[in-house]
Amino acid sequence: MTLYQPFLDHALNVMQEQLSLEPYPIPKGFERKEETTGKGKRQEIVLTTSHGFKSPKLRQIRAAHVQGGSSLQVLNFVIFPQLTYDLPFFGADLVTLPGGHLIALDMQPLFHNSLYQKQYTDPILSIFKRHQQHLPWGGDFPEEAKPFFSPAFLWTRPQETEAVETRVFQAFQDYLQAYLNFVKEAQPVTDNQKLEEILQAQRRYVAYRADKDPARGMFTRLYGEAWTEEYIHGFLFDLERQLLAIS
Ligand code: DBV
């Protein structure tokens, strides 16, 4: 059992119970990718698996799970709502590298105004504060990424793997349940101007994430540039492709 498998299993279980889940297509060749890296005793097989679902209110629920031994584990899990809802994105970037763990967990906002914050951040501030006591701010953080995070952004670099297995796992469960509660409550937006604002906010977010994907270097080294670019634009952050396909 690898570090983030229980996170993925938990997410699939609660989503299966609480959403009308359907599969989301994973482009051919990206469901599972394996490559051997390193030399001699340092050889490791790095396996990347992809998981995709959708539900009536959620356009794409997708995870990339990288398993490469004790010093390379990643679970990147993002939920992209349908463009007819003003729901935030659920974003989890759980990363273990030789230097340690790096955890980013948030409900990433479409808008930064007080009404939006009242609806989608205030209800989770108590969860954030409870976990932040044990998972302190992780420090240095790209300035340009700040517009994409909420005041409840949990960003931390735990020293101990045990903290990931316990505290981080609990925080992940709490954030995901709070998100599913938002989804249950969400009502479709009908105002045309609002719909246009949602579309533009989603495009900005996806463009930023695709452009700055911190995993680009890792994937390129492991699996090559062509595979990596297609994975990023064709699956991980596929909104523009989907918009083209329906236009
Ligand atoms: N990050 C992704 C995807 C990944 C992934 C799709 C499938 O968005 C993994 C894999 N994140 C990943 C890896 C690293 C990070 C780091 C492998 C380590 C990169 C390295 O050190 O080589 C939050 N993730 C990070 C960092 C941040 C985030 C801030 C540190 C990178 C740095 O310091 O530049 N998550 C990340 C982020 C957003 C988010 C910027 C923005 C909206 O949701």
Image (cartoon, helix red, strand yellow):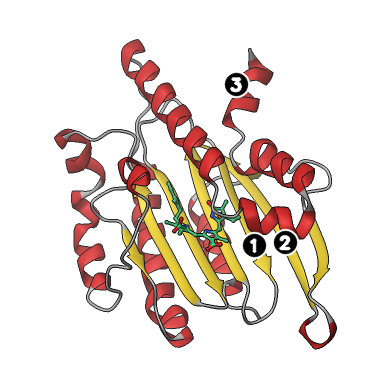
Q: Which mark is residue 65?
A: 1
Q: Are marks 1 and 2 in contact (CB under 8 Å)?
A: yes
According to the image, label 3 marks what residue? 243
Q: How far apart are marks 1 and 2 (CA)?
A: 5 Å
Mark 2 closeness class: few <14, some 14–19, many ≥20 residues within 10 Å: many
Expressed as whole percent of the image width and height from the top left, the position of residue 12 reads 58, 60
Residue occupying image coordinates x 53% and y 35%: 56
Q: Is residue 189 above or below residue 222?
A: above
Q: Residue 219 carries which label?
A: none
Instruction: Work out which quarter of the rendered image holds the N terminus and state it.
Output: bottom right
Q: How far apart are marks 1 and 3 (CA)?
A: 26 Å
Expressed as whole percent of the image width and height from the top left, the position of residue 171 reads 36, 69
Expressed as whole percent of the image width and height from the top left, the position of residue 64 reads 63, 56
Q: Which numbered disc flags the more N-terminal residue, 1 or 3?
A: 1
Q: Is residue 182 above or below residue 141?
A: above
Q: Which numbered disc flags the more N-terminal residue, 1 or 2?
A: 2
Identify the amino acid type marked 1: His
Q: Does the residue labelled 2 lie within 8 Å of ligand 1?
A: yes
Mark 1 closeness class: few <14, some 14–19, many ≥20 residues within 10 Å: many
**Furthest-front residue in this view:** 39
Residue occupying image coordinates x 65% and y 36%: 233
Expressed as whole percent of the image width and height from the top left, the position of residue 191 reads 32, 14
Task: Check disc 2 and report its element: helix, strand or loop.
Answer: strand
Q: In this view, does 201 lie to the left or right of 67?
A: left
Q: Quadrant of residue 243?
A: top right
Q: Which numbered disc flags the more N-terminal residue, 3 or 2?
A: 2
Q: How many marks?
A: 3
Identify the amino acid type marked 3: Leu
Q: Name the one closer to the observer, 196 or 70.
A: 70
